[in-house]
Amino acid sequence: MKLPLKWLKEYVDFTVTPEEFSERMLLRGFEVAEIIPEMDGIDGVYVCEITAIEPHPNADKLRVCMVDVGRAEPLQIVTNAVNVKVGDQVPVALDNATLTGGLVIHPTKMRGVASAGMFCGNEELGITNVEYPGCENGGVMVFAEPHPNGQRIQEALDLDDCIFDIELTPNRPDCQSIIGICREAAAALGKPFSEPVPEVVTGYGDCRDVAQVTVENPYLCPRYCARVVTDLKIEPSPLWMQRKLRAVGMRPINNIVDITNLVLVEYGHPMHAFDLACVAENHIVVRNAKQDEVVYTLDGKERVMSSDMLLIADPVKGVGVAGVMGGLNSEITPETKATLFESAVFRPENIRSTARKLRHVTDSAARFIKGVEPVNAELALNRAIELVEELHAGRVMGGMIDVCSADLMEKEVDASVSHINEILNTNLSSGKMVELLGSINIPAEAVCDTLRIKVPHFRTDIEKGIETDWDIAEEVGRLYGYTNIAPTLMRGDTFRGRVGESFRDEDRIKDTMAALGCLELYNYNFISPAELDSLMLEEDDERRKTVRLMNPFGEDQSLMRTELAGGLLRAAALNLNRKTGFGRFFEVGNVHFDNADLPEERKLLGVIHFGQDEDFFTLKGTLEELFEKLGLEDVRFEKGGSPYLHPTQKAVITVSGEKLGEIGAVHPKVRRAFEVSAEAYIAELDFAALRRHIARQKKYKPLPKYPAVQRDLALIVDDGMEAQQVIDVIASAKARVLVENVRVFDVYRPKLPGDKGIPFGKKSMAFTFQLRSDDHTLTDEEIGQAVNAILKSLKFRLGAELRA
Amino acid sequence: MFEELREIREAAMRELEKITSSEELAELSTSVLGRGGKLTAILRTMGKLSAEERAEMGKRANAVKQELAEKFEERKAALAEIAERVKIEKESIDVTLPGKRRAVPMGALNPLTLVYREIRDALVGLGFTTFEGPEVEYDEYNFTLLNLPPNHPARDMQDTFYVNDKVLLRTHTSPCEARALKTLDLPFRLVIPGRCFRVDEPDASHSPVFMQMEGLVVDRNVSLADLKGTIDSFVKAVFGENIESRLRPSYFPFTEPSAEVDISCTICGGKGCSSCKGTGWMEIMGCGITNPHEIENCGKSPDEWRAFAWGVGVDRVVCLKYGISDIRLIYEGDGRFLSQFK
């Protein structure tokens, strides 16, 4: 909402600085986004008088002028202007002056002659004949009346005020008008504000005898007011009106259109003027459009309507899109003799949907969408007619056509003084509250603990119902000032605050991942359908059950992710391309799977290692350390996993038989698809499964009383044998003693058949383990028997031989 | 013979003076006291002496032997001391050389995680408990129950990603308010973190995915003053004791009265600078007394229960706290950025 200070001054005595005013408005809920000077972007331009003009020694088209800018010494200005003569007063831009378009002026030499600045024309100053009649002369602007030399251009043109650009919250549509915002501004300035009431022009005859309005859909159009003006004289509106419109960024057109625009700005109520001669039978019909009915709007565009849109029509054709834009066929032209002014109320949501579908949110539509009210519709119409009379733009007809199903009754609401004080934790008297509400013209009276409030028509946000006390508390608090309410800490019950278990687990897992050298990513949840192909997922893969957005940024961000791998790979590509030197990342994030109801949401932990120092086992080591930290037991890695992983370097991870996730090298094809230039290794773990197996209660194990003995075994086994198979056999052999800490510590695959005595198709694996008893020191005999039992079991179950 | 013994002793003492290494000392010790040593040799010739002389000679020889052994021991200790000193001197290091680390450099948490934890922990100290809800949410919870029925103009304040007519990506953590009000026993104090989504093209200050933290207090007697006090205490916990906060009126459909929270500028401390557009204040979040319609919509009585709530953008706090001018860095995943938050 643009509020020119000049306009504000018409209603209120303005006694503070613009900055102070902005601060006061801010603390009342109206943020001044910008204080714009009336001559925006113009600086360093002054009035000067030309005292002498000489020809330029080196250029026929230039002249050298001496000017008086009110300083001790005259200045020399070189100009190419032909319309200036000695004695003229003109605007001159001096050193560091800024002009429209960001042009900056410095002293210079023109064809060898020094020039201290530049004379300005209207375009450089951003003004037109509206601001200064006669300034659009094609050359340098010349002042018609005398000014002191050296006067700032802003003062000379009386354009030295500013325009406040005020942000409005959606609950205050009444403030999208000069009158509404001035009402609040006056209160902020501590001044009274008298509501302007337009004079109702009597007129001649009765317009209801010549024109009629039928509203077929009163739900979408709760009120339609109209008046008629005949004997029109279409001409430009007076300068004062044009200036006001230009100050708020509107283009003056003609007196009738300008009147509707001025009323729009003043009262916040959109109006429209039809050429009555173009309305068949002088009959306005407000009805739903027919499907695909075409209307040409004022901007000359073809609008194809749908049946949910509201049309302003006559009995034979459409003459406007309700609330959005008038029709070209009934536009005010220089030949228009009679007009019908429309001032109506349309349903916001309907105008919103129409404007969106037509992709055209006009000023009018924007106001209807924010909400207008029926009493103001009549005030606005009266104001327009008052202006017609003031401008002598035509002969006003008497009477008003008013098709109204809206409730025009003034609302009365009651609010509780004590409840308001409770909500705010204040101790304001009912009298104080009445005074505060009165400052913004909300009449209230106090009866014991009750405030009886007559809600003015413009405050549509104050409702009668359960929220009335809150509505009024908001007004009272706002006007009293939130900064005047002393902060307190909560009273009443005390609470045992805590971080829930799932949050604590996440903390622990993230801390451990960081301790293991990983950087934490937050990737976007949106992925491209192509990502699933790049990951080579099968058609029936669960991860293809994606959730699709109806309104994504684009196809490449149209799905909610079902895996973290893609985001991890993109991070890898980015870090490799930028040579950041970092190769370990992780993310804890949700993935979503399509479902009949809400999508299924699953949290995953994704880890990636990449670069020359990493391999499958460095990533596996990271996971093992994480599992150790969390106290996971019985974790197993078994070959297998998703298609995006390397077919021979991937594993499914289980814990106590439950699937936890997968780990593997990234398939070379996938790496190419994501343009990852180094080997990369990814693990994706189900967060919930991980949490289920966290050792919640750590238990102390007594220290062994009797020493353990360590034994190593080097075995010859089949080349395809996995270490885990051997470990399982060793750990479960009937050794009659405790077998603990079984680990593989060496694997040797012969480079040639028979190399180091290892037969073809075999390899050597070396294991170490500890033997122990809880109740005595093992004898050599027991140890020997145990090792033999293990070897026997290895041979029997795996065909493993002791290496010679 | 006694003379010979005296000479052996004195010769040994003279030799001892010249000794500079433990090897030389060992050699001397052997040559004097060893099995083939001079002292042993002289004792072997004692047979020629009379019994009396032999006794006297034995006594003296033993005294010499003991004396020399002690001297040699002393000398040995002194030499060892010298040798150790030399060794220590040789072991001198340049303490300014870098330390040896594990092969993999330290990792780091994302600043979003760090700031989220700071806010959360400050609130837990005030009796708040964590709560969470789904990222993909019903329109009903995200809007309707929060006093934003279909076609409410304020829905335009939050451009929404829709999955279908009834399901959307939550635009704020507030739907969790409805979930909590419907399912939990009152009163409670909750802190609700989570990812949220809005149709904002990414730029330096907007991200379509962002992290919000909701605070919700429901009790019989809470007030706008309590809201002020609570917000001020966590603002101070996160930004520092010298940071002020203020509330100014605003509008949200789910709160009434509603307010924006400003904090004194973290760059200039409130004097006014380019970061705060000269005002000395920076806007960080919205808050307010929960709209009674919301409480009623969730099946609780607004006559009995009053609530207040706020929603703070963790991303925005991260940017303010660390002086980050482009929000996209948080989500981009550049290791050089992320590794700064160890």
Image (spheres, rainbow, N blue to C red):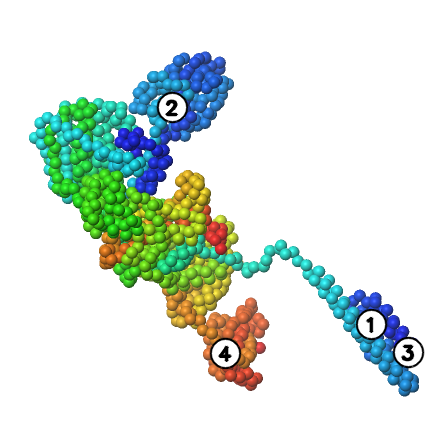
Q: Position of residue A708 (x, y in %)?
A: 54, 78
**SS at badge 1:** helix
Mark-to-mark CA distance, 2 and 4: 98 Å
Within-10-Å neighbours for mark 1: few <14, some 14–19, many 20+: some
Residue at 22% x, 49% y is A449
Image mark 1: chain: B
**SS at badge 2:** helix
Image mark 3: chain: B
Identify residue for label 3.
B2
Identify residue for label 2.
A153
**Contact, mark 2 vs mark 4 (Cβ under 8 Å):** no
Residue situated in front as seen by the camera: B305 or A257 = B305
Residue at 35% x, 39% y is A23
Q: Is residue A103 left or right of residue B161?
A: right
Image mark 2: chain: A
**SS at badge 4:** strand
Pointer 1 and pointer 3 on the same chain: yes
**Contact, mark 1 vs mark 3 (Cβ under 8 Å):** no
Amino acid tagged 2: Ile
Identify residue for label 4.
A739
Q: Position of residue A537 (x, y in %)?
A: 37, 59
**SS at badge 3:** helix
Point out the frontmost of discs 3 and 4: 3
Identify residue for label 1.
B28
Point out the frontmost of discs 2 and 4: 2
Q: Position of residue A561 (x, y in %)?
A: 36, 56
Mark-to-mark CA distance, 3 and 2: 129 Å
* Res. A283 visible in picture: no
